[in-house]
Amino acid sequence: MALGLWLSAPAAMAQPTGQSSDAAPAAVAQSAPPPPVPSDAPLQTGPAPEVPPPLHLTPAGEIPDHPSATALGIRWDFFGELVVNTNYNTSTMVVGSIPGFVQIRSAATTGQFNVSPGNTFLGASATPPRLGPLQLQAKFDMDFRSNAPYLNENAFLPLVRDLYLEATWSHLRLLAGQAADIISPRSSATLNFYPLSFIPGDIGDYRPQFRIEWHQPVVEWMEITAQAAIAQAVQTFAVSDTVQATQAGIPDFQGHLGFAFGAEHGNGTRFFECGVAGHYGRRQVTTNAKQYTSWSFVTDASLWVTDSTLIEGEYFIGQLLGDYSGAIFQTIDPGTQVAIRARGGWVQITQRLGPRLTLHAGFGTDDPFDQDLADAERRSNTEVFTNAVVRVVSGLKIGLEFSGWWTGWVNRETATSFRTELAIIYGF
């Protein structure tokens, strides 16, 4: 799940989560490529699972216990990952330290070198005593990527991801607050924006919602999970010279139906899991007073080939997906004035080699429909990556990743960048 993204330029400032802009950016000129987006503007993607995901980077049984304390009769658990990464891009990527796509080729494109601790992820949960069969829990977590433009890589502001209260009762779970979208339950293991991680083809975000879930074991080797959510239609995307769509007075309706088969592994997953999901919502553009439908259909699956080999991925198709980090973050095309349709997905393989070394390799692509796009708009975005993560001591890991990125532009040359990233990760 990769979730919220803010790309910023002087002509359009990103809005905080849960708000939308009434300003209408000017339509992009068709006679020339769009101006470059500043490479130091902030970009946040997501979402990932609601706790920092140990699945791909830490073998089962080696996850350290979270620090905890008890006060006022409530158990407080604290968790997080300190992440310091350094990376080099051979060509300009937006935004650079966290890439979403490769900038259109121009005289201004150049290589990029970044060092940042902004991916650091911190959180806490509060669990009061059980009330008979009812268990309450509150959760809060954040990173340091901010929700507004900044020009200095040493200026960090908290960006809240999860902030919710949940109640579980037998097979039922109720949630109220801000949490990850349910339409995209899996997360890539790329180091790009780790631990939230972003790869083209992975849609989803964090947004305020009311959610209901039902987990039903059918037999010992099979379980069904049904999820439904009413979510705030938030605007999570802004970039200069593009049309921004705001809410139209109704929430986004989301649903997911999942199936799990086989015996459980040590991390809680089963031998084979699959699911179908989707959402429906409406958006409005103030410049033309039109309303557009936002929708998606998503499938996901994972398979343990052996006890140490995992294959997983997702596929999506939909319309007006910029608010869900899809369609290469495009919503309404400024030239054609239509809601942009797109399809895409990602797949990866995880291979554990002993207790300390884990390898990953993956592919992701985001493919907007060409007929919905005007000249010089983004028409394709693809990434191929491979990385190795070594556990040095308990809680401390070092990861090295190589990736190639290809972003296609309508009637322009495909922009290419190769990226090398080193990450030092300390989890607790």
Image (cartoon, rainbow, N blue to C red):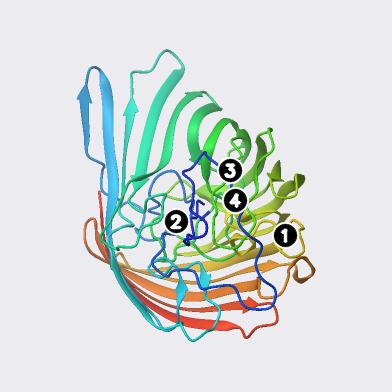
Q: Quadrant of residue 189?
A: bottom left
Among numbered discs 1 and 2, the one appearing first in the sequence: 2
Question: Is disc 4 placed on a helix, strand or loop?
Answer: helix
As drawn, the label of residue 323 is 4
Can I make out residue 46 in this image?
A: yes
Among numbered discs 3 and 2, the one appearing first in the sequence: 2
Question: Is disc 3 placed on a helix, strand or loop?
Answer: loop
Among numbered discs 4 and 2, the one appearing first in the sequence: 2
Going by the numbered disc 2, the residue's amino acid type is Gln
Can I make out residue 280 in this image?
A: no
Left or right of 393 in this view: 195: right
Evaluate if marks 1 and 2 touch, with contact meaning CB atoms under 8 Å apart: no
Above or below: residue 221 compared with residue 425? above
User: Quick one: 406 or 197, which is closer to the camera?
Assistant: 406
Residue under pointer 3: 182
Going by the numbered disc 1, the residue's amino acid type is Ile
**Total marks placed:** 4
Evaluate if marks 3 and 2 touch, with contact meaning CB atoms under 8 Å apart: no
Residue under pointer 2: 44
Give neighbour class at mark 1: few <14, some 14-19, many 20+ (Cα, 10 Å): many
Going by the numbered disc 4, the residue's amino acid type is Asp
Residue 29 screen position, x and y as percent: 66, 71
Question: Is disc 2 placed on a helix, strand or loop?
Answer: loop
Q: Residue furthest top?
A: 132
Residue 6 screen position, x and y as percent: 48, 55
- State the separation of the CA atoms marked 4 and 1: 12 Å
Give neighbour class at mark 2: few <14, some 14-19, many 20+ (Cα, 10 Å): many
Left or right of 67 in this view: 214: right
- State the separation of the CA atoms marked 1 and 3: 22 Å
Residue under pointer 1: 340
Among numbered discs 1 and 3, the one appearing first in the sequence: 3
- State the separation of the CA atoms marked 1 and 2: 21 Å
